[in-house]
Image (cartoon, rainbow, N blue to C red):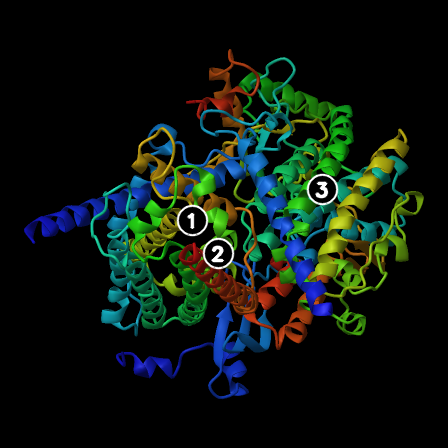
Amino acid sequence: MTRYADMDQVAGDFYTNNFAKTAKESSLILNLGPQHPSTHGVLRVIVEMDGEYILRAEPVLGYLHRMHEKMAEVKTAAQFIPNMGRVDYGHALAWNWAFLGAVEKLAGIEVPERAEYVRTITCELNRIASHLLWWGAYLLDLGAFTPIMYAFDDREKVLDILQMPTGSRLTYSYYRIGGVALDLSEDCLRSIREFIPWMRSRLPMYKDLVSDNIILRKRIEGVGVIEPELCRRYGATGPVARGSGINYDVRRAEPYSVYPKVDFIVPTSELKDARGRYDVRMIEIEQSLRIIEQCVEQMPEGDILVKGAPKPSWKAPKGEAYFAVEGGRGKIGVYVASDGGKNIYRTKLRAPGYSNLSLFAEVSSGTILADAVAILGSLDLIIPEIDR
Amino acid sequence: MPAELIRILIGLVAVAVSVGLIGLVMVWVERKVAGHVQRRPGPYEVGPYGLLQPLADALKLVGKQLFMPDNADPILFWLAPVLSFLPVLLLFLPLPLGDGLFTLDVNLGLLLILAFSGLAVLSLLLGGWASNNKYGLLGAARAVAQSVAYEIPLLLSVLAVAFVSGSLDLATVVKEQGTWPWNWNIMTQPLAFLIYIVSALGETNRAPFDLPEAESELTAGFHTEYSGMGFGLFFLAEYANMVVVCSVATVLFLGGWHGPVLPGPVWFVLKVSLLMLLLVFFRWTYPRVRFDQLLNINWKWLMPLAVANLMLTAFFVKLAQYAVVKM
Amino acid sequence: MNAIKEAFKTVSDLWSLMVGLKVTGKYFLEPQRTVRYPWKAVANLDTFKGHLELVGGVKDIFTPRCISCGMCALACPSNCITVVKRKAPKPTPEEEKALAEAKAKGEKPKDKTPKDPERFLYDYSLCSLCGTCMENCPVGALRFSKNVYMAGYSRNDFQFDLVLKLRESEAHAPKAEPAAPAAETSEA
C-alpha cells in the first residue's frame, strides 16, 4: 500500500493544492470532473466534503477555452459568423443573432422585416430545442433515464425543421449581416405549423411523467435557493434569475426585432429554488410556441437579405456597439469595437453561463452531494459557452 | 446422509447454472424493456431479437484486462466481487420452486435467507474501501448505511407473514396459502407486501434506491474501479439478488407455486418474472431519491408502519388462536 | 394535526408514482420511434448540408462552372479552399505570330486560357460548412452535397480535389442525381 507513498506528496495540481490549503482537518477533497457524468462537458468542480455534506465548492474553468474572442480579431465580421454557432451548442442561433445584431447596429444596417420574423421563429425553435436538451439531461442528473429519450424524440422534430433552412442540426451559422441565408420554405412553414400542436400535446405527458412525480419534487423543491439579491450580485440572468423572481427578460426589457409585436409572458417563479427554475423553463417552452405561432401568422412577404449585404471583405465602420439577446441560458451580450480596419478590432462575448455558474460555489456549500448535482443541473450550464 | 448430500450437490450445480442463465436473461430483459419504454428497439443485432447480446457482453467482460488501481489493497480488492457472488448461491438453496422441489430442507429457511443476504453489503463495503478511490469510498459508505437501515423493515414485514403462517419454513408458508389469489398472504398482509417491496428495492440497490452506484453523483460508486469480470460479478450478483428477493416475495405473499391449471414451478417462475418486470419498470420510470430522503423513508415511514403492522398481526393472530381455543 | 395532514398529503402524492408508471407502460406498448440505421435510413437528408462540391457547367456537366476567380478562397473563414488556376497553354508558332501582330497594332491580346480550375483543393476537416463561399461565388459554381455518410480513417481522407471528384462522378452518372457520394455507402 505504501509503494507510492512518495508520490502522494506531490499529488494534485495547483488548483487542488491551493484549495486544500484552507481545508478543514478530516474533510475529504473530491474532484468532480473534468470528466464526470453530471458536469456535461469538461467542467471541474473541487468540493470539500464532510461525509455527504459539501463544505466548500470551487469551479475550475478553462478546459474548453477556444479563443473565440481572439479569433474575432483575425477574421472579418462575416467570416466570424460560423464561430458563433459553436460557442453554445444548445442555443446557437441566439449567439448568431447577438453578434450580428451588434455588427448591424455598428454599421446602421436595417434588417428586412421578413428576415426579422425568420430570425425570431428559428431562434425560438432553437430555444425549445435547448430547453428540451436541458430537461432530458437534468433528469439524467437526477437519475431518471427515460425522459431524455422522450425529450430527444421531440427535439429531433425541431432539428428536422431547423435543418430545412440552415442545413445543420447543431452548430448553425444561418444568420447573415443584414438578414438570413435562406428563406423558410413553404414545406418548412408547414412543418412548423404541425409541430406547434404536437409539442403542446406532449407537454402534459412531461408533467405526468416527471413534473408531478413525488420523487422529483422532493429532489428539487427547496434545493439551491438563490435570493434575488445574490442573482443581481453575480449578474445571473435568464431562467436562473427568473426562477428567483426577477422579472428580467431581454426580449421585454430591451426589446429587439419583432418581440414588441408579439404577445407572450415572461414567466417568473417566487420559489427561488431548483423547482422555480424548472417551472420557468417548462413555461418558456409554451411561451416560445406561442411566439412562433404568432410570428408564422404575421410574417410578411419580402426580402430576407438587405440589398447590398456586406461581403466578407466588408469593413465595419469605426465605432463601437453593444447588442444583447435573450438566449436559452440568459442574456447573451456582444460588444464590438471597430477601428475601421479589415477586422473588427475587439469583440467581447458575454456568456450567461459564466455568471450563472459563479452562483454555484455560493449556493452549494452546506448541501449534500446529490443536491449539489441538482443545483448544478438546474443552472443549465453549457461548458463551451462558459469557457468560450 | 448421502441422499441429502447428492441432493444438495445437484441443487448447487443447478443453482449456479441457473443464476448465470438468469443473469444473462435478466440483462436482456432489462435492456429490451428499457429500449421499448424509451421507444427504441434495444439490442436486436446479435442473435434473434438480440437474445445473444448479453452472452456477447459477458464474453467481452471475461476477455477484458483485470485492472487494479495503484495503492489498492489487492486481497480485499479481488475478494469483494467473489464475496458478492457467493452468498447468492446459498440464498437459492431453501427456495421451494414447487411442492418438494427444493435443494435444502431446513425449517428455518426464511432465517437462512435473511442472514445470508446480510452478507452482500460486506462485499460492497470491501470493494469500495479497497479500491482506494474517493467515489468508491462514498459509495461504500452509502451502501452500508442503506443496507443496514433497510434490513430492519424487511425483516419486520417478513416476520408478520411468519406470524400468520406460524412457521419460518418456506415450504410450510406456501402450503398455508391456497390456489386462488384471495387465498394468498397478500390479501391478509397488503401493507407488509408494500413494505417488503420497497425495502427490497433498498436492499438490492435497485433504482430508485440505487444510491451506492448513483451514476450522476458518484460516477459508479463502489464499483468505479472494477473492470472486466470484477465488475461482471457485481453485476451478476445484483441480478441474482433481485431474483432472490422476488422469489421470497412470491413465496411469502403471492402463494408460491400455487395456481390453477398450470403446474407449480411454472406458476412460481411466472410470478417471479412479473415481479422482476415491475422492478425493471420502476428503474426506467423514476428519478433517484436523495440519500437523506432514502433514510427518512426508512426510519420515518417504513419502520413505524412495519412495527405497527407486526403488532396488529400478532394481536389478531393471538385473538384467532384464543377464539379457536374457546370454540 | 398538521403532521397528520402532511402525512396524508405524502400518501396521496404517492399516486403520482402510479401515473408515471402508466406513462412508461403506455409507451412500452407503442411503436418505436427510432430507425434501424444500417438497414434503413432517415428521410430528411435532402436538406442536409454535406461537404462542398462543384457544380458542372451548362454544356458539359462534368466540367466545373467555376471561373477560378478565387472569391471563395478569399471569403472562406477557415482557409480550407485553394484554387489552382490553369497555366496558359503554350502558344503555337502561328498563334505567337498573331500575338506579335496584335501587340504591334496596340490591341490587347485575348486570353485563350480555359477558365475552369486545374485543381480545386478543399480541406473538409477544416470546413465549418457556413456557406460563405457559395454566397460569394459570382457564377454559382459551388453547392453543398447531400452526402451525410462521409467518413474516413485519416485526415488525408478529407482533402479533396473537387475537380477530380466532379469528373469521377461521371463514372456513376447513369445513376440518380447525387450519385457519387452515395455509391460507397449504399451497401445496405
The amino acid beneath tag 1 is Phe
Q: Residues within 10 Å of mark 1 (few under 14, many from 20)?
A: many
Residue A123 lies, in percent from the top left, at 76, 44
Residue shown at 81% from the left, 52% from the top? A103
Q: Chain of mark 1?
A: B
* Residue furthest top as drawn: C174
Residue shown at 50% from the left, 20% from the top? C169
Placement of B135 over or under A184, stated as above or below: below
Q: Which residue is mark 1?
A: B253
Please state the total of marks drawn on the protein image.
Answer: 3
Q: Quadrant for residue C188, please give it.
A: top left
Q: Is residue A102 left or right of residue C3?
A: right
- How far separated are the C-alphas under marks 2 and 1? 9 Å
| Element carrying mark 2 | helix
**Mark 2 in CB contact with mark 1 (< 8 angstroms):** yes
Disc marking residue B192: 2
